[in-house]
Image: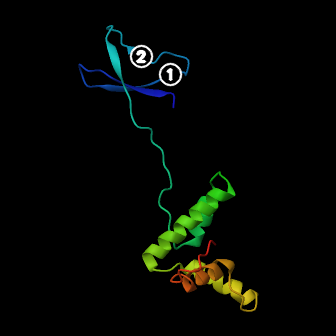
Amino acid sequence: MPYYDFLNEKTGEIKSLFFHMTEEKEFIDTDGYKWVRQFSIPTASIDTKWDANDPNDFIEKTAKKRGSIGDLWDKSAELSKERERKLGKDPQKEKLYENYSKSRRGKLHPDLRKKKLKEKFANNKFIELDI
């Protein structure tokens, strides 16, 4: 922003003055007193609060963002892990697996198949799965 704050250390008065980018940012009043420039944290708003259980919240917040499809997948995975941590399982992921299975005559989702295989052979020291 082109506004800069200056403090008069004698009186404690603060003035907010407009400067162009090319101008030197210093203020000397009519008495010849040089005011001290005050630096402040810029005011910015970032939507840091995401509701992991609300799919509409995800749609609204990602619609306004710039980024790649990978960024969306990363955020989606992060919210999924948060749901699993809070609820013990991810209801949205369970619904996805169920819909996948219904639309393919009972066939398991590939991620669910991998998970079940890993669980099945977890205690077998002779078989090591790299999936």
Amino acid type indicated by mark 2: Glu
Above or below residue 24? Residue 7 is below
Q: Which residue is mark 1?
A: 19
Which residue shows up at 75% across the image and 87% down it?
103
Q: Which residue is mark 2?
A: 26
Q: Position of residue 127 (x, y in %)?
A: 59, 80
Which quarter shows the C terminus? bottom right
Q: For the residue labelled by badge 2, is the local secondary structure a helix, a strand or a loop?
A: loop
Of mark 1 and mark 2, the one earlier in the sequence is 1
Q: Is residue 52 visible?
A: no
Amino acid type indicated by mark 1: Phe
Which residue shows up at 44% across the image and 38% down it?
42
Q: Quadrant of residue 57?
A: bottom right
Outermost bottom residue: 105
Which residue shows up at 63% across the image and 63% down it?
73
Which residue shows up at 48% across the image and 70% down it?
82
Do the residues bearing badges 1 and 2 touch, measured as CB atoms within 8 Å? no
Outermost front residue: 126
Q: Is residue 34 visible?
A: yes
Q: For this view, does 128 lie left or right of residue 68? A: left
